[in-house]
Image (tube, rainbow, N blue to C red):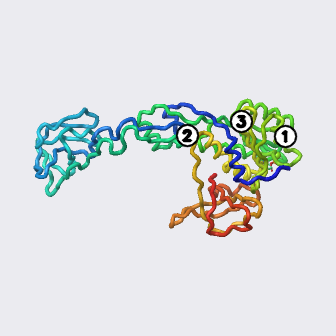
Amino acid sequence: MTELISIAEAEALVAEHMPSFGSERVTLDRAAGRILRQRVHAEHDHPPFDRVMMDGIAVSWRASLPRAFTIGGAQMAGMALQTLADDSGCIEVTTGAMLPAGCDCVVPVEQVRREAGTYHLIDGYQPSRGQFIHPRGSDCVAGTLLLEAGMRIGAPEAALLAANGVASVEVGKTPSIAIVSTGDELVDVESSLGEGQIRRSNDIAIATALRLHGFDRVALEHIADDIAATQDTLGRLLGAYDVLILSGGVSMGQRDYVPAALDALGVRRVFHRIAQRPGKPMWFGIGPGQQAVFALPGNPVSALVCAIRYVRPALLVALGMTPAPKEYVRLEADVDGNAMLTCFVPAYVQTDAQGWSMARPVPARTSGDFSALPHTHGVVQLPPGNACTPAGTAVEFYRW
Ligand code: AMP
Ligand code: MG
């Protein structure tokens, strides 16, 4: 039996051994949620010209500004630069237009009254120089670093990519992932249950946890509790996928064939067993073709905790994502821990009026009890050494 390692060691060993999946170029319509693998600089000044910010008229400001302006032209959004020829006149403008040459003040349409070919300022209105003008380069100048490698492409990032003419973008290549359940007792969701059978759910739970973060190259497989079948199927999957995520068959039982099969196939074990509950039997190794192989325990809470605590963060970093800062919550109630093991306890998290994220522990009765998980948001991580972690303690939190 191998030594238990700490969760910090497990996390570090996964990070150290994870392969990179490389990068690829995708068009912007396919970039949502992907991880940037390039820097992006401002293509031009933003805005690229002095921009009119209001519909109205543009005038040449002076201390003793007249109250009436003859219309000397129009500068609509998208038109090439117009010039105010007579500086006692005005040019009609729309939001997004270039500020006409010779003008330095925009008077909103609400503050003028039009009579025939003349605009009159409404009584009492005093414009000031420079008003309602968004000066060229005032957001950023050409060449400014706007996006860094490692960012996830959300709506603001996509807007900047488009605005700066980046039609295709270098992103982390999504790995192909096989999610493999093991066990003679497991049938698929369409089957009716025979004696001693349950429907398999770990595979779809793990797939969902990954798909929600953009991993869409996911296939589900199942292996019976048979040593030859385990080895054959795993051998085939190692030839076809970048990542294998197994659940079940990894403990010490007489039908737990996974570690031996992986060993026989040349998958180098990095660790087996972590000092944690649930999820102690987790196994991690690297295949002969640099495949990352995670073998998770079979109990549904254990499998999901390991998937969100180790597998998903490691896959995101392998895509090139800058590791997310750890999230902390405060315990709303005392919660039982363990002297030797880090404990993960499902919790319902809500932000209170003071701005604290408060976690109400919803302990699973066993690591096989996943019926209450939909009423929780993730798990709190309780360090070892405490039989009880008191209410008010700040602890790490991992979302489903
Ligand atoms: P094992 O680690 O293979 O001994 O499995 C531990 C427990 O988890 C057993 O009760 C299994 O029936 C259950 N289990 C294993 N794999 C799955 C799965 N894919 N879906 C639901 N339960 C599972
Ligand atoms: Mg099993």
Taking the image as shown, residue 215 lies to the left or right of residue 203, namely left
Q: Is tag 2's residue or tag 3's residue first in the polypeptide sequence?
A: 2
Q: Residue furthest right?
A: 254
Q: CA gap, disc 1 to disc 3? A: 17 Å
Indicate the amino acid at tag 3. Gln
Q: CA gap, disc 2 to disc 3? A: 20 Å
Q: Is tag 1's residue or tag 3's residue first in the polypeptide sequence?
A: 1
Give the residue pinned by disc 1: 260
Mark 2 sits near ligand 1, with its Cβ under 8 Å away: no
Where on the picture, by quarter, is residue 104? top left
Taking the image as shown, residue 309 lies to the left or right of residue 45, namely right
Give the residue pinned by disc 3: 291
Residue at image location 27% in from the left, 39% down from the top: 97
The relative height of residue 88 versus residue 327 in the rendered view (above or below) is: above
Q: Dot 2, how many residues are within 10 Å of its Cα: few (below 14), some (14-19), or many (20+)?
A: many
Residue 25 in the image, given as x and y percentages of width and height:
53, 31
Residue at image location 23% in from the left, 34% down from the top: 81
Residue 182 in the image, given as x and y percentages of width and height:
79, 42
Q: CA gap, disc 2 to disc 1? A: 36 Å
Q: Is residue 191 visible?
A: no
